[in-house]
Amino acid sequence: MLHERCVHIVDDEAKVRDALTLLLSTAQIESRSYGSAEEYLAASRLKEPACILLDNQLPGMSGIELLQRIVAETRESTVIMITAYGDVPTAVLAMKAGAFHFVQKPFDAEALLTTVEEALSRGDEDAEAPLEGKEFKARQALLTQREREVLALLLEGLPTKLIAHQLRISSRTAEHHRAAVIQKMQARNISHLMRLAFVARNLNGGDRGGK
């Protein structure tokens, strides 16, 4: 667990930084803001564990590039990636690069605070990771063949329309399978589903969690 209840906000939009600062303050969480990756690097010590809310769309160095720098310096930091709504491929890339979670704009305040609290308590969650990974693998047995196919494509970052096209089913049917997968896997949302899948993959030496 991080000793300091402080979140570093890296986003080039002042309004977003202000909104996040206000939201975090309602949960008695301190915050520090930066307008670019370069500003964060100049002000922070990368080897010290930190919780970071990181926007991918930044001027200069991108959020993914900063994420890679942070992960290379210390695995103890928790990075929550901020992506545009529906930008699942970027979210998948961020998770593979070592992000703790990802959130999409516009934010759901309650969900975001839950994610931040999980990140600040990472030590506790890491202790539960092996069990979560095993449970994820066990729940896959509850999926139908079609749902397994949808899960695999979700974990590749495909949006529902492309999943429907690839499986030659209607968008409504794809949405139905997507909802069923999330429910059966007991995931709160796509971000949580991806995190569980990555934990399961790591427990199995990096095999594909969706297959």
Image (cartoon, helix red, strand yellow):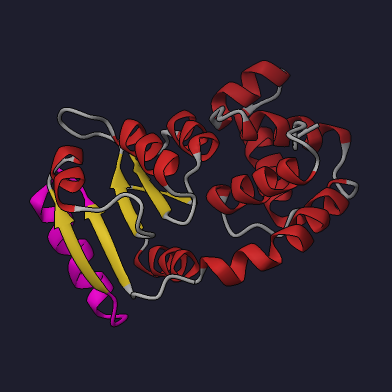
Q: Is residue 195 visible?
A: yes
The answer to if 24 sits in the magenta stretch is yes
Q: Nearer the viewer, residue 188 or 131?
A: 131
Question: Residue 37, position in %: x, y?
Answer: 20, 40
Residue 166: image quadrant is: top right
Left or right: where 173 falls relative to 161: right
Q: Nearer the viewer, residue 43 or 126?
A: 43
Q: Nearer the viewer, residue 102 or 207?
A: 207
Left or right: where 166 falls relative to 205: left
Residue 160: image quadrant is: top right
Q: Residue at x 63, y 34 (%)?
A: 154
Residue 129: image quadrant is: bottom right
Magenta part, dominant SS: helix
Q: Residue at x 33, y 55 (%)?
A: 52
Question: How many marks can you see?
Answer: 0
The region drawn magenta spans 10-29
The answer to if 47 sits in the magenta stretch is no
Q: Residue at x 32, y 54 (%)?
A: 53
